[in-house]
């Protein structure tokens, strides 16, 4: 998917220059950070303000190939004259070296706001750290199982971490063959996705077949011209759902906030967000500790040593947390003011 997208970009705009977009503090910065796909005021703008005003650090803004191509398509339709493709950092070593030289201060880390840009950000991080200009750059390497739910559960299961029952299918026939091994209802969803998009709770085999057929005929998440080639069948865990926002540094993890999700039926299952509330550790200290410890184990096994993460879990009938997904990004909602008011700090402040 990634290299197909890069090839498409080269065909559309084969000679696009690579131009860093830099925001500078009042003083000459000694270090800086890279933000990929930064648009929201409660994530990227907030992080930029802290970097510039509190740390006198520079900020470089860039776009992932998926986002740049999407903006290019939109701008052509609305007659917006901006070369979004020039905001994609190059991955070729010589071009990337020139791009880093143009920044004129060392980068120490990358923060990606979009799910679609996470894979590119990890690849870019590996390339930056391989160059002399990246000697101070901290990152977590490149690991596809952080984004692919099937790979995620398979990998964590191989590390003896409890996960849900699952089967990867490439056709509706595969779904039909695997369905008898599950207690309905079952979850049918794409292996790679965002939030609850194309996630179905299926009470019967016909419903699972219909959902899988729909998914296989949709575009793959993060791709514009490629259909899903796989569909994921999973057991449905009926217990409470939580999300844990963490900050990691040097392999040490700190929970910043734990959230309790309140969801209602959307017509395809109980996946529509009705509310998200901050979970108070004193309400159930044992549950809080158990969920956080489980999340820390997942982060460590996934080699997440630095940065922000947002991990979602459900509680099984036996009381054990089971991972839904691990997102190597900040909680994509305006939760920072609530954290500061209730907890006394937020994830970005802890990160600094």
Image (cartoon, grey):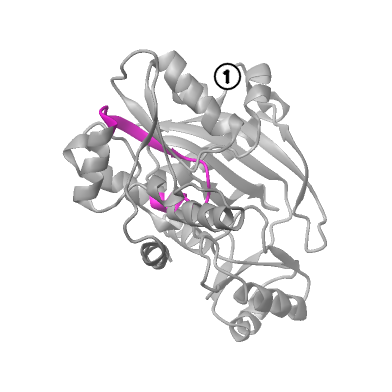
Q: Left or right: 251 with respect to 117?
A: left
Q: Is residue 254 above or below residue 215?
A: above
Q: In the image, is 317 to the left or to the right of 219?
A: right
Residue located at (82% from left, 56% from top): 265
Where does residue 60 sit, x and y in percent of width and height? 39, 33
Residue under circle 1? Answer: 345
Q: Residue at x 70, y 74 (%)?
A: 211
Residue 109 magenta-highlighted: yes
Q: Nearer the viewer, residue 287 or 80?
A: 80
**Horizontal arrangement in the rendering, residue 268 relative to residue 57 (left or right):** right
Residue at left 69%, top 31%?
A: 279
Q: Is residue 15 left or right of residue 116?
A: left
Give the extent of the magenta segment: 103-120
Residue 193, position as x, y percentages in the image: 58, 59
Looking at the figure, which quarter contains the N terminus? bottom left
Question: Residue 226 location in percent, x, y?
Answer: 51, 72
Which of 16 and 3 lies nearest the eye of the viewer?
Answer: 16
**SS for tag 1?**
loop
46 in relation to 156, above or below? above
Is 340 colored magenta in this rendering?
no
* Number of disc labels: 1
Q: For this rendering, which residue is in front, 258 or 156?
A: 258
- State whether residue 141 appears in this view: no
**Which x, y percent locates residue 87?**
40, 45
Residue drawn at the location 27% of the way across and 41% of the way down: 99
| Residue 61 is at least partly visible in this image | yes
Q: Quadrant of residue 34?
A: top left
Is the C terminus in the top left, top right, bottom left or bottom right quadrant? top left
Q: Characterize the local packing of mark 1: few (<14), some (14-19) or many (20 or more) Cα atoms within 10 angstroms.
A: some
User: Which residue, as the protein is rendered here, is positioned at the far left?
Assistant: 132
Q: Is residue 138 above or below residue 226?
A: above
């Amino acid at each position: 998917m990634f290299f197909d997208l890069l090839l498409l970009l080269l065909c559309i705009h084969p000679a696009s220059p690579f131009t860093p977009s830099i925001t500078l503090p009042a003083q000459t910065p000694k270090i800086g950070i890279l933000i990929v796909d930064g648009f929201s005021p409660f994530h990227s703008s907030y992080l930029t303000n802290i970097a510039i005003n509190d740390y006198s650090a520079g900020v470089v803004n860039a776009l992932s190939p998926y986002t740049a191509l999407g903006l290019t398509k939109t701008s052509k339709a609305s007659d917006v004259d901006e070369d979004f493709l020039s905001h994609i950092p190059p991955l070729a070593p010589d071009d990337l070296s020139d791009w880093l030289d143009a920044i004129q201060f060392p980068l120490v880390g990358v923060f990606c706001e979009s799910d679609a840009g996470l894979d590119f950000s990890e690849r870019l991080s590996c390339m930056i750290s391989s160059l002399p200009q990246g000697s101070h750059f901290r990152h977590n390497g490149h690991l596809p199982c952080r984004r692919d739910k099937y790979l995620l559960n398979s990998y964590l299961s191989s590390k003896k971490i409890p996960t849900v029952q699952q089967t990867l299918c490439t056709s509706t026939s595969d779904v039909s063959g695997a369905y008898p091994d599950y207690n309905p209802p079952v979850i049918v969803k794409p292996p790679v996705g965002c939030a609850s998009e194309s996630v179905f709770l299926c009470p019967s085999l016909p419903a699972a077949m219909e959902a899988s057929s729909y998914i296989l005929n949709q575009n793959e998440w993060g791709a514009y011209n490629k259909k899903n080639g796989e569909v994921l069948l999973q057991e449905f865990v009926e217990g409470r759902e939580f999300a844990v926002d963490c900050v990691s540094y040097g392999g040490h993890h700190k929970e910043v906030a734990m959230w309790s999700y309140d969801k209602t039926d959307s017509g395809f299952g109980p996946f529509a967000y009705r509310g998200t509330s901050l979970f108070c550790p004193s309400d159930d200290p044992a549950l809080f500790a158990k969920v956080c410890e489980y999340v820390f184990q997942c982060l460590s096994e996934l080699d997440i040593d630095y940065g922000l993460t947002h991990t979602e879990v459900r509680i099984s009938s036996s009381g054990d947390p089971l991972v839904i997904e691990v997102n190597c990004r900040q909680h994509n909602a305006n939760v920072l003011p609530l954290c500061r008011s209730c907890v006394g700090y937020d994830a970005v402040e802890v990160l600094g």
